[in-house]
Each structure stands twice: as C-alpha cells, then as structure tokens.
Amino acid sequence: MATERLSSILNHINPSKTGLSTITQKNADDIVITLAIRTPLAKGGRGGFKDTPLDYLVYLLLKEVNKKMNLDPQMVEDICIGNVSNGKAAYIVRAASLAAGFPNTSGASSVNRFCSSGLKAVQDIADQISMGSIEVGLALGAESMSEGGDRLERPFHEEILKANQDAADCMQPMGQTSENVGKDYDISREAQDRYAAESYQRAERAQKAGWFDDEIVPITTTIKDPKTGEQKKVTLTKDEGPRYGTTFESLHKIRPAFPAYGDRSTGGNSSQVTDGGKIFAHPVPLGLQLTPLPAAAVLLMKRSKAQELGQPILAKFCGATVTGVAPRIMGIGPSLAIPKLLTKFNLTKDDIDIIEVNEAFASMAVYCRDILGLDYSKMNIRGGAIALGHPLGCTGARQICTGLSEARRQKKKVLLTSMCIGTGQGMAGLFVNEQV
C-alpha cells in the first residue's frame, strides 16, 4: 500500500509520457474489478432458460455473486442493473438482491442505454465510487428478449417526427439501419457472411477448448417439457448459441431478413436476439439459435478498498465514453466511440491487446473493423454476438467478462470493449487486466 502511494505521488511529480504507461500504473484511487461472472447464454423458445423468468435468473446470479465474492454483503452499498425491455427492472433487481442475501441497506436501480446498458451500469457504479458516494458497488446486465427487445409500441408524436430527419429516423428498425450501413458503405453480402462464418468458427473453437469456463457460472433452473408438461431440473454450464460446423457456404444460402430494406443482412449474419415466433429489432428467421436470457455481474471498488478487504484484483476500470451518430446508420457507433476513448487516454489502437466489438450485425462489425484498421486477430477472439447472442441489457457486462477472461488466458493487459447503440450512439470502455 505504502509503495503504491509513493508511486502515485512520484507519478504526479514526474508524469508519464505515454498513455499506456499511465493506465497501467497502480494507484490507491483506481477503480478495480474484483469479480466478473456471467450466466450461460441460452437459446430462446426451446433453450435451457425458456421457462426461467428474468427476476429468477437475476436472483440466481446474485446468489452466485454473494457466494463467490468472499465479502460481507453488508459492504455492497449499491446495485445497478442494465436492462432495456423491462420497465420493472428496478423492482426486479431490488427484490432479487434482497432474496439473494444482500441487506436492505444496499441500494438498487436500473439503467437503460439500449445495447450499452451493461457497460453504462458499470460506469455509473464506478462514478459513484470515484466520487466517494459509495465504496463498493455491483453492476449487472440482464435481458429477456421475449419481453420485447427495443421495439417501439407506437410512433413518436407527429411534432417530433416532422421536426427533422434524425428525429424521424429514430423510428427505423435496427434491421433497416443495418441495410443502410451495408448500402452506404458498400459492405457486401459476401463480406458479411464471411465475417459471420468466422464468428461462429471462433466461438466453436473457444467453447471446445474451454475458454469460456472461467467466466460462466453454472445455473440450475427448471424446464418444462412442452408436450407432457413434465418439469425437471437442469443445470446450464455453457452457451447454447454456437452452431458447430457453420461455414460461409451454409450462411450464404439464408434468405435476407429485411427484404423491405435490402438483401444483405440475414438471420445468419445478424446477432441472435429473437424469441419464439416474435421478431424484434434484430430479427432472425425462425430455426436459428435464439439467445434471449442471460445475465452478467461486475463487482467494483477502489484499489485501496480491495487491498483492505483482501479482495483479488482482476482488472482496473479506466473509464468509458459515449458518442452519437446519425440514427439511420447507428451501427457505425463504435467507429467514433473507439477513437474518442483512445484520444481521452492518449492511446493508439496498437496499445490495445484485446478488443470486443459487439456484433449487432455483420454489416457494422465489418465496417468498424475496416474503417478503424483494427487487428482482427485481437478482435472478438472467441466470436461475438452473431455466434453467442446479443441480449441488449447484458451485452456490455458480458463483454467485460469475456474480454477479461481472454486477457487472462493470453496474459495480455489492455482490453477495449465497444458497441453500437439503437437511435444512433456508440459507447466504448477501457480496462487493464491485472491477472498476468
């Protein structure tokens, strides 16, 4: 502790010349992650969580957090869940946390910034800790896509719609925005299918090698046989989305998912986020894997607090930033959020070891990778949302669990996560792995 405080003082006197050396310094006031775990991502409709409601899954994950954090739950002062679809998410996280053994003196809240909600929850908890409002906090991301995804129930007021084109374009379905990106930036169907095939193949390799195992906690729940009504207990231990043996050729046969808007985005090269027979903002034709209901959790505190409590420090949370883009091409959000984040920390893309860019659609993933010149060998090493699924509120927290796990495996340090956001935004977060 004394050594790190002296180092912090010397760093202020003799500031580092590079952003990389700055973010990898260890200071008492750093916001650190001491636990990052998630549930498996299950298929919707027929998967292992098909009969598990969101409140119960959040409760089960919080029980695992309570068991694994090696910390008196009285120490956790606030819990924030990122969620998009459920207007009662604040009720859910409060009741689930109390049932899971957290005290009634802990706060609870929900936050919604569409696909970045999980990262936004982490940022909100970190900001509270940094400001001294709390000392220990828990950020979650969870989503049940069967509750509606980011679908609008009615048009905006006519005065909003006629005010300007950007406001009107917030009505565009996400599939339409994907086709816009494909057409505007000439991302061909072939390029999208080749990217998607690689995502599936990377996920298959990672799963077979057991790379996901240290980020996933087994979840035991009940499943009902649709024919007999018989209920039985099942324990889920791995993601259900990856389809072994997926190839470019097999994906290239799939019909377009949004024929009214274009012919490049399909159920095979878009993220897996439908449920049963309902089609939401990122539609996937029936018959493909569906992943509507996972949850992820990230425990945060200052470095000095973690050391005082004897907590293992997994990583340092450096910060996050958000930016806006035209709603009709919302998928390009990471192409602006990532440079903005790098500039804030005086970094270059070459300083980043592991990159997690959410694959809402192959159109935006290909565009962001290519326009930024990202090293694809560093990006989505275990596959992404095309193969694993994109449960909106969970993704931002899930990416942290996956990215830090991969950084530990490779003994690499710097992790960057990013995602596009509905209505035209992008967000990016920066982390330093300390388990090397």
Image (cartoon, rainbow, N blue to C red):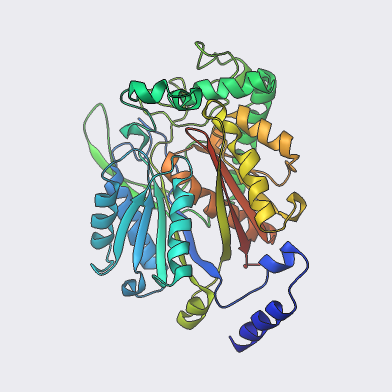
**Looking at this view, is 381 or 169 the one in front?**
169
Q: Position of residue 379 (x, y in %)?
A: 67, 44
Name the residue rendered at 35%, 64% in the picture.
Answer: 78
**Quadrant position of the N terminus in the picture:** bottom right
319 displayed left or right of 226: right
Quadrant containing the C terminus in the rendered view? bottom right
Does residue 60 appear in this view? yes
Classify 223 as above or below 329: below
Q: Is residue 320 above or below residue 159?
A: below
Looking at the picture, does residue 69 appear above or below residue 347? below
Residue at the far top: name it: 260
Q: Is residue 302 above or below residue 275?
A: below
- Report if residue 277 is visible in the image: no
Q: Position of residue 23 (x, y in %)?
A: 67, 65
- Name which residue lies at 73% across and 67% down: 21
Which quarter of the figure has residue 108?
Answer: bottom left
356 vs 175, left or right, is right
Say which of 427 and 414 sits in front: 427
Residue 128: give x, y in percent of width and height.
Answer: 43, 65
The residue sitting at 29% across, 47% down in the picture is 89
Whether residue 303 sits left or right of residue 143 in the image: it is right
